Structure formats: structure tokens, C-alpha cells
Image (cartoon, coloured by chain):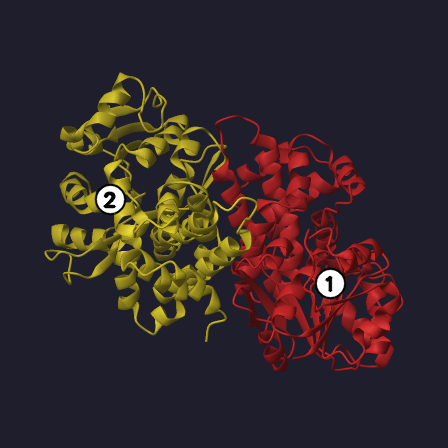
Chain colours: A yellow, B red
Amino acid sequence: MARIAVLGAGYMGSAVTFPLAERGHEVRLWGTWLDDELVRASRAGRHPRLKRPLPPTVEVLDSGALARAVQDADAVFIAIASEGFVPVFERLLPHIGPDTPLFCLTKGFIRAEGGALEPAGGILRVSEAASLLCTRARGRPVGRWAAIGGPVKAVELADGIPTGSVYGLSDPSMAELAASFRTPTYRTIPSADVTGVELCAALKNAYAIALGICDGMYGPQPGRFYDNAKAFLLGASVLEMGAIVEAAGGSRESAAGLPGAGDLYVTAQSGRNRKFGELIGSGIPAGEAYSRMNAAGEIAEGYHALLHGRDYIGQLGGGLPDRLPLFRTLHAMVCRGESLTGLQRLFESYPQG
Amino acid sequence: MARIAVLGAGYMGSAVTFPLAERGHEVRLWGTWLDDELVRASRAGRHPRLKRPLPPTVEVLDSGALARAVQDADAVFIAIASEGFVPVFERLLPHIGPDTPLFCLTKGFIRAEGGALEPAGGILRVSEAASLLCTRARGRPVGRWAAIGGPVKAVELADGIPTGSVYGLSDPSMAELAASFRTPTYRTIPSADVTGVELCAALKNAYAIALGICDGMYGPQPGRFYDNAKAFLLGASVLEMGAIVEAAGGSRESAAGLPGAGDLYVTAQSGRNRKFGELIGSGIPAGEAYSRMNAAGEIAEGYHALLHGRDYIGQLGGGLPDRLPLFRTLHAMVCRGESLTGLQRLFESYPQG
């Protein structure tokens, strides 16, 4: 039994407390300053997003109690939205030892804003940002880091639906701890590919928009399905994710397996990025679709993955952008307002090269 | 403009005449002795499976007119069910030259039954069977062969839905012809991986059963979805197809792209193999589910892919079966009547090794 702090009381942080509690770990769930209402409601008996009580052994702490949440923790889960990662991680560092294992559920890219995160304007993977912040704080990079990916809908995880999640471990010594989170229905699968797992976790949100757009454009026509077109996009997405991962030094296997193909499948079935795509496909300009969802408290992370992903891919160089026709098309349609005919032109651009 | 014979007037043979005719090719569609009713109805104005008239320039020929169908053909499409492949191919050979390009839409494995196909009882890929038959007939293997794969529902192809199909070409000289089949919505994508494309085309039918079983087991519970579990199965399927393809000398990229991940996605969304899995998942014994569908004229090809695929994988040797836990579980559940708890045990067997 380990003492485990989970930072972030949203969907995923709260959901992961279910298997952790089931395995008998001592779990403290800490909510950020944006999670106060989630914390209050959870204490009152029901997590508003998961729509059920949290496991009774989980201690729920509010934003003022970070130090207490992580005190003597054997491991820390980070389940903060990517926008909030840097401020939370900076507050966290003074409270944990240099070798405390960190399990990261945060997905997405982080834009360097100077300070420890250089060059300003550059795009970092979450583990890269963490290491830079760590190096500034204590002169050495993150010791033990797990990038968590794979197809996990939080509600289904809390519900005990069979779920596979890949843990990309920076250090093989973390495998034992990762195994201790496993239940009969939550299967933690170790991998050595931190880079591939975290890139797929970010990129699949971008590619899921494509399948949503397809449904938005074509879906309303009765009796006509567009499975061929969606499968075309899915296959192209997996290949492009593989190319990006490989260029970044990761393994194509991550893109072909649960972190890439698997997670893209689940993300495209439902959820915010798919909905964002559907709105765009139905003719609503991307900016308006984003604002409309944002006003309802729904952030389409895929938009940021496209915006930041484009710069990240540019940093990798080597003519990579030319090998990513779907990513380029999505970026043009979603971030630069190019018309929906871009999708038809994309189809017509195959085969490439 | 080329003269093109399409053998087999079922779903896929008939559907591929749409882009071929659109590109102005002279198309002759030949029905086997099992297709007489399809031929009659098509001539009368409506293909019964595609539920629409065939393109007006397509000449529809019945089973007695094979010689005429392939006379002076610049290319022959083979769109015969795998059970019928050997007798049709044997009849075809005397009528075509040794270098006539053959484009194969037949999916599945072929069990050698002696004669040219040795060793009796062995399992062959379609291109292997074709080459053995060719060698016996004329002393040399097939000259130019394309294995066609990727996510193509026939009705959508006929309907002009954007569709990508990978042509695994044995000879790069066939690329020009494959390009001449392309329309704005039917994108033929050349590949050098005959083995990988044809293996994925066969295997995806087996793996699609898994996603159907999952829906059959869990689907009827209102408000509960099993996207995590299905995505887990999808990701595992893509990795296992990649391992099989690689062991057979093909490329893992075929499994990660349109022939593998893409085609599995579309096959699992709907269709006979998915339905077969749903019936099994709902508690109907596999044999009864197969018979019931068969009586309605629906053949669950995935059943044969499991049965023959197991032997094919065994032939590849090298401990491959041990690296395919999902395939093994499916085979046990579908072909040997093992109970549905096999799926839960499968989940619990991850991570492997």
C-alpha cells in the first residue's frame, strides 16, 4: 500500500482514484483553485462530472491544502489541464523529493514563456517542461516520470469498464508501482516510450476533430454513412502520428497501439473534440464553435493541439510537415478558417508524393 | 482507356465498376454461377445488393461468358469469395496472358487441397495460391498481382463517398494502371507490400468479431458504454496484425494504416463480422450464430479467418502464437466454444510477458 496524491479533481484525476482506492492505496485527491466546486460537491457526496460518489477512502482536499496532499507521498499523479500545468508544478516542486515518482495524466503541449521554459515561444512536451522547471528549482531534471496514455474515458474507468492504459516510464523501477495500480478492469501497461505516449495523448485530440468534421459535413444526410471516409481519416491519422513520434525520437508502435489508434478511436466516438469537429463540419466557423463550447465550460483541447502541435512539428524539422497532409489540412481548416472543401482536396491529394 | 474484366458480381466487384466506368474504362462485369440472379436483376436495371443501377456503360455477363468477359482484357479484377477463388482462377488462366495484370479483391485464406496446392491442408494467402496454380498451368508464377485492401464498404464506394484503397503491387509497373482507376472520391494508393495488404484484409474480419462480441456482451445495458474496452481491443488488434504481417515478411505500416487500422475500424462499425460477434456476445453459441446468419445468406468471413488464420500463424512459427493473446482468445471463444469469460480473462492477461 502506498500513499498517493492525485492533483486535479476533474474527470481524469477523480476517475483514477477508483482503481487506486480499490487496490487499497491511501489516496488524497487535491483540487486546484478552479476545482473548488468539484471538491465541495464531492465532499457532500457526489462528484458532479463523474455523477457518483468518490470511493469512501479517498480524502478530498481543496486548493489551499497542496502541501498536505503531497506530504510523504510515495507517488504523485498529475491530472491538471495543460494550461494549468506550469503553475501547479511550480508549487508542487518544493514539497516533493527529487525522486518522487510522478505519473502524468496531463495531455497536450506547453508553450514556453521564458523563465525556466526557454526558448520563449517554443513548444514543449509536458515531460520536457517538467524537466526544465525541475532543473531550475533543484539543478537536475525530473527523476522518475510516467506519461500516461491510451483509451480511457474517465466515466468508464470509474464505472469499472475494462480499460487499458499505457504508462510510458522514464525509469523501469517505476513498473512495480504502476503494477500496483492495476485492478481486474484497469490494466496499466508499461512502456519505455515516454515521448511516443505523450505525443499520441496530445495529437489524438487534434486528429479526432477530423472525424468529427466528417460527421458534421455528411452526417445529417439520411441513409448515407461516411464510414469509408472516416476510416480513411483514421488510418491516415495513425500513420501521421507514427511519423511525428518517430521524428521526435519515440516509437511508431505507440501510434499503432493503445496510445495512438486506440485512444483516437475512443476520442472520435464521442467527447469534446469530436463535438468541436462536428460543429465545424456543420458550417459553424471554428472560432465561433470554440467560443460556444467554451461558454458551456467545454474546452476543445484539439484546437490547442493543432495550434501548438504545428509549431512543435516545425521544431522537429526534417521536412516533416510535408509528410503530414491531414495535419496541415486540419490546421488550415480549424486554425486559419480555410473552407471545408479542404477535406475534399485532402482526399484528392492521396496518394502523396 | 483500358479494357477491364471484373470477375464476381457481388458487392465489391459490382461497386468497383463505378469508379472504373467513371474513368471511361471499358468494363465487363462477369457473374459466377452463384451470381446468376444478381446478373439478371442488374441487367433488368438494379443491382440487388447495391440497390441501384450499375453504370450504364458496364457490360454485365453471366457465368457462361467467362471467355468473352476476359477476352483482350488489359486487366482483370478478381472479386470472388475466397471459397470460390480456386475454381474461378483455374478457369480464368487459359484465357489470359502470363503478364495480364490481376487486381485481387478476394480476401481471406485458402486451404490447400492437394493438386497444385501443396502441402494439402496447408493455409495459403490468395496470392500464394494464385502463383501455385499459375506455375502448374504454365510453368511460372503470377506475373503481375495487386492485393487490394483498405477500408471500403461497397455501397459507399458506389455512392461516391470519399474512399481510400491500398493497392499492394507485386510490380511497380502496375502503378500507372492503378492510378487510372482513381476518381476524385476513389483514391487508389500504391504500396509495395502485397503480403501485408492481403494479410490485413483477411485478419481484420477476425478481429472485428472481437468488437462485436464486446457490444453484444455489454451493449444492452442502458447508459453504459464500453468504448474503453472496444478501444483496448482495437489497439491490441492493430499491434497483433502488425506482428503477424512482420512475421510473414510484410510491413507493419500496412497494419497501422488503411489496410489494418482503417479497415478494422470500418469493419467493426457495421457488417456481417460485427453482427456475428454481437450474436456471440449476446450468448448465442458461435456455431448457431454462424448457421443462423448463413441461412439468411450472410457469411461471417471472420469465422474462416480465425479458423484458417490460426493454422497460417502456426506455419509462420517462431513463437508467434504466444504473442497474439487476442487472436488466441477469439479463436477459443468462436471456434472452440470457450465461454465469454475468456474476454475478461484476456483483459486481465495484460500486460503480456
The amino acid type, in three-letter code, at marker 2 is Ser
For disc 2, the chain is A
Q: Visible in this render: residue B81?
A: no
The disc label shown at residue A74, or none: none
Instruction: Say left or right for A93 vs B53.
Output: left
Which one is closest to the eye, mark 1 or mark 2? 2
Eyeballing the image, is B321 above or below A311?
A: above
Q: How many marks?
A: 2
Q: Secondary structure at mark 1?
A: loop
How many neighbours does mark 1 have within 10 angstroms: few (below 14), some (14-19), or many (20 or more)? many
x and y, in percent, of residue A126 in the image: 26, 52
In the image, what residue occupies the spot 50% across and 71% down?
A: A351
Locate the N terminus of chain B by quadrant: bottom right
Labels 1 and 2 touching (C-beta < 8 A): no
Labels 1 and 2 positioned on one and the same chain: no
Q: Check disc 2 and report the residue beneath it.
A: A291
Would you identify the image quadrant in which residue B27 lies? bottom right
Q: Secondary structure at mark 2?
A: helix
In the image, what residue occupies the spot 82% across and 68% down?
A: B89
Instruction: Say left or right for A67 vs A184.
Output: left
Q: Visible in this render: residue B276?
A: yes
- In the image shown, does B21 or A121 lie closer to the viewer? B21
Q: Check disc 1 and report the residue beneath it.
A: B79
The amino acid type, in three-letter code, at marker 1 is Ala
Eyeballing the image, is B177 above or below A266?
A: below
For disc 1, the chain is B
Eyeballing the image, is A336 above or below A223?
A: below
